[in-house]
Image (cartoon, rainbow, N blue to C red):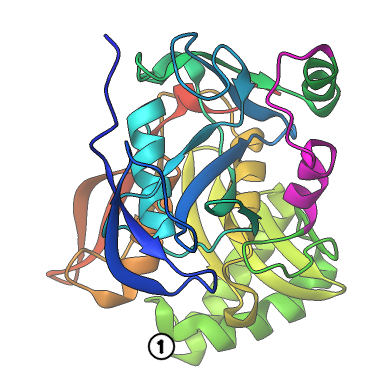
Amino acid sequence: MIQNHSDELWDIYTKDRAATGEMHQRRNRMKAGEYHIVVHICIFNHKNQLLIQQRQPFKKGWPNMWDLSVGGSALAGESSSEAAARETAEELGIHIDFSEMRPHFTINFAEGFDDYFIVEQEIDLSTLILQQEEVRQVRWAGKEDVLRMQEEGTMVPYWFLDRLFEIRGAYDAHGRNNAGITIACASRKNLASWMSMIEIVKRDFPGFETPEKLQAYRNTVIRHISRGSAICALYKNMVVGILLFSPRHNRLCHLAVHPEFRRRHIATRMVNLMFRSLAPSPEIRAKAYPGEDERGIASRAFYQSLGFVPAKSVSHDGCCREQEFVRNSTALPTV
């Protein structure tokens, strides 16, 4: 069944991207000086492969061609990030949290603004629910494969395709260079910087209220380092991200990112390294503050963006302190 989108309404913007308060119906031609927003989502996996989709042969605009992961126009009342989330859910049947993202880059075109979002996420293609009126099929493709398809005329000819794979690895949604940040298993030489960062973020977590508890945590970190289950993000020699996990119980035990280095996909990169370090298991678990606690908003949204779903609440000393999350491990990357 071919869906008719001609009745869609778009917000109209000026050339300076200021909303005019007026709307445009898709079926009509836009007038001179009227512009609208289009979003494109580029989903990469840890192998630096891009998820590409083949457009249906009956779809207007590049029919039957291979395209980026997701794309479409923002509807009236939607922000760019809201449009990205909706289009991803509609075309692929998956839910990604774009609420804290800005486009990695924007390119002006004759009638509007093309916003490009770059996401790193491991996806089991067999779990996708494709929008049949839009998407014919999907697959992962590396840089050489994508450029070959473009050369043979089966890929939409984005002029920046060769650079897209580099942008993905080097910049976050705010254009800051992440090339100097490395993700690796922690060693004892990282311990002092690790504990220094804990002093900055300890208010966001239970269990750091006294010097004795901090010392106990330090001992826990040492044990994890010796087992190879401590992961850190390093900016030069400074620890800016930390993750402890239990291979035995397939559990993410502790995750934090330095406040000045957030929104740079550091947490996602650390979690992906953890995924690759875990043995096959039916599920992986993590914890965050429960739904009524504002301190857990970011953590809960992050875990859900990676495919974790809320499970039971865990009580401590008779009061609800933590919300457990579970992720089915069948979607983990195969390395």
With respect to residue 88, does 209 lie above or below? below
Residue 265: image location, x then y, percent: 61, 58
**Quarter occupied by the C terminus:** top right
Crowdedness of circle 1 by 10 Å Cα count: few (<14), some, many (20+)? few
Residue position marked by numbered label 1 in the rendering: 209
With respect to residue 166, does 122 lie above or below? above
Residue 278: image location, x then y, percent: 59, 34
Q: How many marks?
A: 1
Horizontally, residue 328 falls left or right of residue 228, namely left
With respect to residue 210, does 214 lie above or below? above
Q: Residue at x 39, y 28 (%)?
A: 91
Q: Residue at x 32, y 36 (%)?
A: 27
In this view of the protein, which residue sits in the foreground, 35 or 221?
Answer: 35
In this view of the protein, which residue sits in the foreground, 284 or 57?
Answer: 57
Q: Which residues are magenta?
A: 152-170
Kind of element beneath mark 1: loop
The stretch drawn in magenta includes residue 270: no
Q: Which corner quadrant of the image does residue 81 belong to?
A: bottom left
- Residue furthest out toward the bottom: 211
- Residue furthest out toward the front: 32
Residue 87: image location, x then y, percent: 38, 38
Q: Which corner quadrant of the image does residue 66 belong to?
A: top right
**Quarter occupied by the N terminus:** top left
Q: Residue at x 57, y 87 (%)?
A: 200
Horizontally, residue 63 falls left or right of residue 312, namely right
Q: Residue at x 48, y 48 (%)?
A: 38
Horizontally, residue 265 falls left or right of residue 22, namely right
In this view of the protein, which residue sits in the foreground, 218 or 328?
Answer: 328
Residue 28: image location, x then y, percent: 34, 41
Horizontally, residue 147 falls left or right of residue 247, namely right
Indicate the amino acid at tag 1: Glu
